[in-house]
Image (cartoon, rainbow, N blue to C red):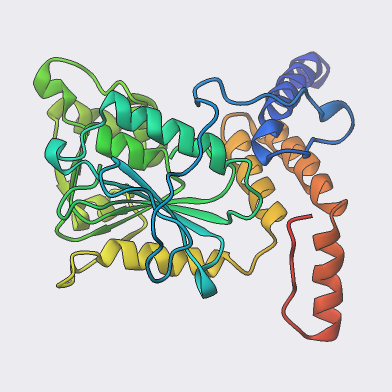
Amino acid sequence: MAAAAAPAARGALQAGRAGLAAAGSRLGPGWRLPGSWAGRRAGLATWARGWAPAGAAPRRGYSSEAKAEDELRVRHLEEENRGIVVLGINRAYGKNSLSKNLIKMLSKAVDALKSDKKVRTIIIRSEVPGIFCAANLPVPTIAAIDGLALGGGLELALACDIRVAASSAKMGLVETKLAIIPGGGGTQRLPRAIGMSLAKELIFSARVLDGQEAKAVGLISHVLEQNQEGDAAYRKALGLAREFLPQGPVAMRVAKLAINQGMEVDLVTGLAIEEACYAQTILTKDRLEGLLAFKEKRPPRYKGE
């Protein structure tokens, strides 16, 4: 039995290696997986090229901000929040529905941010009160849901690593009410997040959940009572992002890659993927800095190298 299973196991391992090599490009420029795991670096075909953030007069706490009329505002936080980027969806007249222009802007922003080593965590939020509406990025992404996240809005949140919501938020995949199905990843990501049976129930019924219900089924990680400013979920997301900032940036990217790739294969292949990802961190200057900082009992000064 063991001998018969060996060729299949080797085949699965080789398939996992191929998938990991292809995914290695998500670590950003200059990063490859070691040895036979290294693959040709390639950008994600779904993201457009050549984006640069629109300039505007900065306001307190931000180093750059898109023009007010733009549907997407890209903000690089400063001071103690340096390394956190906020993607603010600002399409009030369309209730933040995912227009072709907004999708194009999100795609361009993602393409620029995924190769920026200074970016540590990305928060996706709504600039329109009461409505939410990350993307395939190598760094942690957090969806802050302070209002409605229905259909495409929830699919965008499901593409993020972590989701937090206000108790008053409303979210659901409601496409079957319109005689269509969730076509932006909802049928694939929702079952992976909460399980197949419950995902089918929610999609078949087009049910809308509030924050407490979403937390109970595992759709979100944290639920907060809404505050007077209407940004409770965003404040929680910012707090989580601050927790991520001190960690080694290369380790964060590689950990995300190992988790994402490992969840798609069997355990044996997943452990091989983890081993290859761990080897990637051993070669970094940050690892040596971490050891030295521990020895000297001081905070590490990581550079993402």
Numbered label tally: 0
Which image quadrant is residue 99 in? top left
Residue 88 visible to an observer of this rendering: yes
Q: Is residue 38 above or below residue 86?
A: above
- Who's the residue at 20% across and 44% down the image? 171
Between 1 and 304, the one nearer to me in the picture: 304
Which image quadrant is residue 62 in? bottom left
Q: Position of residue 153 (x, y in %)?
A: 26, 38
Residue 196 visible to an observer of this rendering: no
Between 178 and 215, the one nearer to me in the picture: 178
Which quadrant: the N terminus? top right
Left/right placement of residue 131 relative to residue 218 reads left
Left/right placement of residue 259 relative to residue 198 reads right
Left/right placement of residue 106 relative to residue 145 reads right
Left/right placement of residue 211 relative to residue 23 reads left
- Who's the residue at 57% across and 36% down the image? 263
Q: Is residue 175 above or below residue 268?
A: above
Q: Position of residue 235 (x, y in %)?
A: 33, 68
Q: Position of residue 230 (x, y in %)?
A: 18, 65
Q: Position of residue 256 (x, y in %)?
A: 60, 46
Which quadrant: the C terminus? bottom right
- Who's the residue at 68% across and 40% down the image? 27
- Who's the residue at 28% across and 48% down the image? 217
